[in-house]
Amino acid sequence: IASQEAEKRGWHLYLVGGSVRDLLLVEAQPGTLMINDIDLVVDGFHQAADVGAGIELAKALQQIYQNARLEIHGAFQTAALLWHKDPELDSLWVDIATSRTEFYPYPAANPEVEASSIRQDLYRRDFTINAMALRLTSPRSGELLDFFGGLLDLQAKQVRILHPNSFIEDPTRIYRGVRFAVRFGFQIEQRTEEYIRYAINSGVYDRTSQENTKTPALQTRLKAEFKNILAATYWQSALHLLDNLGALRCLHHSLKLDGEVLRQLSLLDIYLRRFGQQQNLHDWQMRLEVLVAHLEPKYQAKVAKNLQLADDSISRFNKLFAAQTEIITSLPNCELPSQIVHLLRKYDLATLILIALQSPRKIRRKIRHFLTNLAKIQPLLNGNDLKELGYKPNPLYKQILDDLLTATLDGTIKDKSEAREFLA
Ligand code: CTP
């Protein structure tokens, strides 16, 4: 239907980017293919289509598929149609753009857009394997447009850049290249790797790691790439490759993937399996926080803010050093369960996990004991019981419940009748 609508208007329509790559990959290595993100590009027949053609086509399709939601991104002259098949299931995104050339007004900036033809549109893309198009309109519908050797690179299992400036213009592509290489078991082609190293050595990430209001969109895209990588099953290999290329300096120039942080990251998985559900912690975010927490305390909150982490992450890093100092100093002296609870209950789960990972085993054990057992223990009597016993709600209530909790935790009282005696 989309191609008919395009043909009616005298345009070509192409499937481009990741879905073409994935279709070709699945043809070469049969397996399951789940495409829920489709990129379409509209182009004119003899000259570039109007800049607004993609948006016009999306609007026409929305008239036909009224259950699709239409989103228009005016600044990029693109539109998206979104189908929510079922809130529990995957959704389908169809992005529709007009073929375009992008100009980067300065390195690492957001691109500015101008109408162009499909070849130029493909040339502005990141890697040859992502720069192929499948024509959907006639004549010659079904034809693969592969101007830059994408198919050969897929067969040779390599990630190859299209033009030398690519990583300078868009440093997130370094992360994308690593992601594709690790995900598909490909190599980063030698020249491409040289361009990556050149971009990093020329300081492309130093601009991003300073507080820089000029590139907030870049930070958002970098955070999205971290999320993609750290949420995937191949996150460890990807981190090693990023470290090897020197790309982790986009977080901070001092960040290295040393044995200590690797130990913390693998221990983190155990904590996430055990406690992650309690507060819906996201694996990727905690992995990223472990990397940030590995930096000197004075840099942590700044790096979290630069990367536009959520406010609660930033405030966690603002307080992490003080929390760690208090716990390291006081926890060894806490012998009674109630002392452990009173010390640790003021901290959120993520803070406690970050501190546990960095602490010696004795401290880690106490934190784990708190999270597994002590934090769940309730006082033997609750507010209703107190009311029944004739206590009127007053400011002392909280204190009474706290005393009851202390006695419950330390085993001074064992059941409700002992609790009543305790109050008397
Ligand atoms: N693209 C690019 N440079 C970027 C991001 C995207 O050139 N920094 C181009 C690539 O051609 C890519 C397409 O835009 O294939 C779509 O991007 P995206 O949906 O982010 O990635 P996919 O390649 O579809 O990969 P994935 O399957 O991981 O979503």
Image (cartoon, helix red, strand yellow):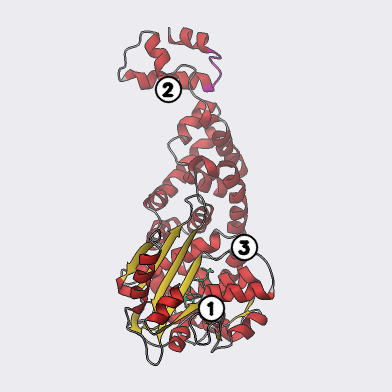
Q: Is mark 1 within 8 Å of ligand 1?
A: yes
Identify whether 157 is placed above or below 219. Answer: below
> Tags 1 and 3 in contact by the CB under 8 Å rule?
no
Q: Residue furthest right?
A: 29
How many other residues sit within 10 Å of disc 2, few (<14), some (14-19) or many (≥20)?
some
The vertical placement of 367 against 239, above or below, is: above
Please identify, in this view, whether the residue under mark 2 or under mark 1 is nearer the observer.
1
Disc 1 marks which residue? 130
Tag 1: Cα neighbours inside 10 Å, few (<14), some, or many (≥20)?
many
Q: CA distance from mark 1 to mark 3?
A: 20 Å
Task: Single out the mark in the foreground, 2 or 3.
Answer: 3
Task: Give the mark nearer the N terminus: 2 vs 3.
Answer: 3
Disc on the earlier residue, 1 or 3: 1
The magenta region covers 409-415
Q: Which residue is mark 2?
A: 402
Residue at (52%, 36%) from the top-left corner? 331
Q: Secondary structure at mark 3?
A: loop
Of residue 126 and residue 47, the one placed in the foreground of this image is 47
Residue 189 point in image, percent of width and height: 61, 82
Q: Quadrant of the N terminus?
A: bottom left
Can the viewer see residue 252 in this picture? no
Q: Is residue 376 visible?
A: yes
Magenta stretch, overall SS: loop
Residue 241, compared with residue 149, is above or below; it is above
Toward the viewer: 134 or 4?
Answer: 4
Give the residue at x 58% y 84%. Answer: 150
Amino acid on which the number 3 mark rests in the picture? Tyr
